[in-house]
Amino acid sequence: MTTATTSTRSAPPRRRKKDDTKLALLFIAPATVGLLAFLVWPLLTGIYYSFTEYTTLTPPQWIGFENYQAMFADPVFWNSLKVTVLYVLINIGVQTAVALVIAVLMQRLTQSTLLRSLVLAPYLVSNVVAAIVFLWILDTQLGIFNIFLQWIGFDPIAFWANETWVIPTVALVNVWRHMGYTALLLFAGLQAIPGHLYEAARTEGAGEITLFRRITLPLLRPILALVLIMTIIGSFQVFDTISVTTQGGPADSSRVLQMYIYQNAFAEYEFGYASALSVALLVILMIVTFTQYWLTRAGQSDLD
Amino acid sequence: MSIKSTTTPHPARSGAVSRRRLLQGSAALAAGAAGAGTLSACGGAQAPAGATEIDYWLWDALQLPAYSAAIDRFMEHNPDVFVRITQLGWDDYWTKLTASFVAEAGPDAFADHLARFPEFVRLGVIAPLDGLGPLDEVPAERFQEGLQELWTGQDGKRYGIPKDYDTIAIMYDRNMLAEEGLSPEDLEGLDWNPQDGGTFEQLLARLTLDTEGRRGDQEGFDPTSIARYGLAADPGIDYTGQTSWSPFALSTGWTFTDEDTWGRSFNYDDDRFIDTMDWYFGLVDKGFFPAFGTFGDSSPSQAQLQSGASALATVGSWMITTFANMEGMDLGIANLPAGPVGTPVSMFNGLGDSISAQSDNKEEAARLIAFLASDEAQTIIGERAPFFPSTDAGTETAIASYAEAGLDVTPFTDRVANGETGLYPLVENSASISSIMQTAFDQCWMRQIDGADFASFNDRVNALFD
Amino acid sequence: MTTAPHPVTDEVREPGPAGARSGERTITRARRGIPWGRILAWVVMVIFLLITLFPFYWMLRTALSSNTALATDPASLLPVGLNTGGFERVFGMQDVETAIAQGGSGASINFWRYLLNSVIVATTVTIVQTFSCAMAAYAFSRLRWRGRETVFLIFLGSLMIPQIFTLLPNFILIKNLGLVDTLLGIMLPTLFISSFAIFFLRQFFNNISREVEEAALIDGASKVRVFFTLVLPMSSAPLATLALLTYMTAWNEYFWSLMVSYTDQSRVLTVALGVFRAQAPGTGPDWSGLMAATLVAAAPMLILFALFAKKIVNSIGFSGIK
C-alpha cells in the first residue's frame, strides 16, 4: 500500500502543503459512522462475548478464557479448520488458475464485449441458488452430470456424499460462480501491461508460453495479489453452499469453520463459544492477509 | 407472507384436479389470473383500527392455506384481534426465530417442533400455557392420546397445544406393483424381525432388480449393480430415524430413552437397536437398499419412487399430498410390517403451537391457539390439510377428504387408533445429540462401523445429561 | 499496489492499443501457417463458456418442466412436461390449490411489490454507498492528514470480520432504532460503507495524474471542487464498475434481508423467492418454481448489464488497479 505517495515523487514546489485533516474527517465521516456502528461495535461486542457463557437468549456471564481452552481441546474445531483450509486451497488454487487462463485468452483472442459479459453471468446468481442448481446437476442418480458420466462409461460419483469428493465439489461449484468475476479483475490487470513489452520479446523469438512466464505473470503480480487477498478472505468464510447442500456431512467431512460457528450460535445456542470460534477465524484471516501484504511488497520491484 | 383471504372455496384438493389442469394449460392460466386478483387484494391487509395485532408464524407452506382459512374464521369471531401470518421455510424459520427472540421482535404465537421446544423452555423464551386465557378449557383428552404429553415440560406445565400429528406408513407405486404381478394385498400382513428380515425382507428381495433384470431373490442376482432398490432411502437419516429405521427399531420393543418423555439416558447401545442397525444398513450389502450417497437431497424418496429407482418407501404422513401429486404414479399406501412385538409400530410426533414469553398479547395469542384446537377450526383445517389435525374431529375430516380423492390413509391413522406408536424422543440437548449421532449413522450407512459401535456414541450422548 | 508514477495512466484508453494488437496478430498468424495454438485456445475458451452457460440452460429447462414429472426423465435435455407453471407461480399468477397440486407452496407471491422493494434497496445502496466510499477513498488517497494510513488499515481490516459477529448486534441495533420491517433497516448497515469499495476506488484515485490535480489547485480550486469536478468525472469508468458490483451484491443479499423483513412492505425479491426452496424437511424444493424464480430475479441484472456492458466491461479494462 502506499505510504510513499508524496515523498517519492519529484513534484513541483508544493505551495499548498497544508494539512487537510478537517476536510478529510468530513470526507470519511459517513463511511466511518457506518464502520463504527455496523462493523466495529459488533466486533467489540463479539470479542466480549467470546469471553462469556452466552446462550444467545439469556444474559452473558464472564468466564475468562474457558471458551478458548475448550476450543483448543475441541477435535471438531481442529477438523473444521483442516476442512476449511483444504477448501480454500482447492477453491483459490483452481479459481485463480482458471481465471488466469480465461483472462489471458480474452486478452489474446478477442475483444468481444459479449464474451466478457457472458463469463460474468454466474455472478448474477446468488450463492444459495448456485448451490441448489449444482446439488441437482451433480445428484448421484438423477443428476444430468452423472447420467453423462455413465453415458461415457464411468461409474456415477456421489459428489455430495463421498467424504473425498465433497470438499472438492463445493470448492468447484464456487469456482463456477466466481471464475468470471475473478477473470475480469485479472483481465483488468493484463490490460495495464504495456503492449510494447510483448512486441519486443516476440521479435526476439519468444513463444506464447515464454511471453506468459516472462512478462505476463511477473507484471500481473500486484493485481494478482489484490485479487488473491479479496478472494481468500471470501473463501475462508464459505457457508451458504455447504449449508444448502451437505450441512457439514457426510460425517463432518465438509463441516467448515463458518458452518460450525453457525451451528453453535443458532442450533445449540452457544453464542459465547461461537464468538470464540469467530475470533479464531478473524485471527487466521488477519495472519493470512498480512502475510500476503508482506509478500506482495517484497515482490513489488518487478513492476517498475 | 401475510395472507389474509386465500380461501376461495375449492372443494377438491385432489391429484386428479391438478392433472386435468396441467393438461389444459389455458384453464390453469385462467384460474391463475383469477387467483392473482384475490392475492394482490389481500397482500396489503391492514389491521382494522382498534384491533390488537398479533403475529403468528409457521414454516410449512403446505399448511398455510389451511391455517389462514382457520385464522380468518378466528378473526370473524374475534374482531378485536388481527392476526398477521408469516410463513418461512424450515431453515430460515428457526434462524429468524432465534434472532428475533434476541432482539425481542418475535411472534406472539408460533408453530413449534419437539426437537426445538425443550431448548426454548430452558432458555425461558416460551410461556407456560396454563392459566392463559381460555387454554385451561382445552383438555388433553381432546387430542389424540399422548399428544399433549409431548408438549408438557418437566415442570408439568404445558408449553404447546398440539396442532397436528404424524405417523409413518409404506408408500409405493401401484403401477410398479402390477407390473411385478403383485397386488396391494401382497403388502398386507407382512412381518419383520432383525435376524432374517421376515416376509418383509422377502418382499424387498422380490422387488429389487439388478441392471441385468434379475430379481433380488433370483439366482445370479448382482447386489453391486442395482437398477431398482427394494427400499427407498431418505437422505436425512438422523438420530430419530423418523422415516427410516425407527419403525423397525420401535417394533422390537426398543425405546429411545429410559422414559417416555424427558428421558436422560439413551438406548443406542441396546441389543435390539444394534441388531436393527445391522439389519437395516446391512440391506446395503444385499443390494436391497441404496448405499450412502446414492440419492442426495435433490432426489428424495418420492423422486426415487417416481423414477422407478426404488420400490417401497417408509414415509411420513405429512408427505401424502406430495406423493399423491407425483405424475405418472398411482400412489398406494400400506401398513408397516409387524415387528417382534407382534404389531407394526410407528413413531408418533406432532407439531404444537407455542406462545412467546416476550409477547405483550399473550391473552389474545392464547385465544388464537385455543381456537385452532377447537372442532370448528380443526374441521376447516382437516378439509384442506395435507396432514392430520390433532383432534378426532379434525382427523376424521382429513380421512374423509383423502378418501374422496381416492386415497386410503388408514395405514397412518390406524397406528394411533390401535395404540401402536412410539413417541418422538422428547429430550434436552437435541441439537448436540443430533450432531454426535449424525456421524454414527453416516458411518454405519457407509458400512464403516457396525451396530455395536453405536455404544461409544451412546456414551457421549448420555454424558450430555450428567 | 504501488503508487509510483506510471507513464500511461489514462482512464480512457480507447481502441488504439487493441487495434494495434490485432494488427500485430495478423502478422503473427501469417507467419505461422495454420494457427494450431489459436485453435487450441479457442477450444479451451469454448469449453469454459459451455461450463459457464450449461447450468443456465439447465435452469431454463427445469423452469419450463412440470415439477411433478421431473424425476420421470432426468436425462432429458428438453423440458419434461413442458409448461409455464413455474413462471406463473413466481409472478403470483396461480391460485393456491393449483400451486400446491403442481408441487409449489401455499404461499402467496406479490411479485411486483417485491421487485419494487428490491429496486429501491439496491438503487439507494448503490448510489449512497458509492458516493460515501468515493469521498472516503479520496481522503485516503489524496488528502494529507495524520493517521491516514492507520485509519485506512482499520477500514481494510473490517473486511475480515466474520458475518456471524455482525448479524445479531446489528439486528438489535436496527430493532432499537425502530427500523425492523423497513427498507431503511435493510439498507442501513451497508448504506455508507463497503471497505472493498473504498479499497477499490482508492487504487484508482492514486493513479489519477497528480499534475492535473495540482494545476487545478494552483488555479485556486478547493480540494472539494477538485474532487467533484475533476476526480469523480475522471473516474467515471471505475465508479460505474463499482456501482454494478454493488448493485449485484445488494440485489443478491439474502440473510440480512430475511432477518429485517417481516411483511410485504419490506420484503425483497430474494427473500420472497426463498419460498420456492424446501419449506419443510423432506419435501424438497419446488424445482420449476425455484429455477423460474432464479431466472426472473437475475433478469433485471441481465438487463442492467446489457445496457451498461460496454462501458463497464471496458472500464474493467482500466489501467487502474495497481
Image: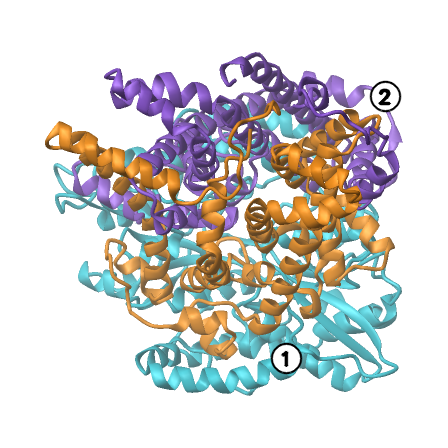
Chain colours: A purple, B cyan, C orange
The chain that hosts pointer 2 is A
Q: Tag 2's secondary structure?
A: loop
B409 or A63: nearer the viewer:
A63
Tell me what residue is drawn at x 67 percent, y 41 percent: A267
Question: Could you tell me the amino acid type at mark 1?
Answer: Ala
Specify whether residue A80 is in view: yes
- B179 vs A69, left or right, is left
A132 or B349: nearer the viewer:
A132
Q: How many discs appear?
A: 2
**Label 2: which residue?**
A64
Question: Could you tell me the amino acid type at mark 2?
Answer: Gly
User: Measured along the vertical axis of the image, is residue A20 above or below residue C290?
Assistant: above
Q: Tag 1's secondary structure?
A: helix
- C50 vs B112, left or right, is left
Hey, which quadrant is residue C126 in on the image? bottom right
Specify whether residue B7 is in view: no
Mark 1 neighbour class, 10 Å CA radius: few under 14, some 14 to 19, many 20 or more? many
Quadrant showing the N terminus of chain B: bottom right
The chain that hosts pointer 1 is B
| Residue A110, percent from left and from top | 30, 42
User: Measured along the vertical axis of the image, is residue C149 above or below residue B310?
Assistant: above
The circle drawn on residue B69 is: 1
Tell me what residue is drawn at x 45 percent, y 85 percent: B31
Quadrant showing the C terminus of chain B: top right
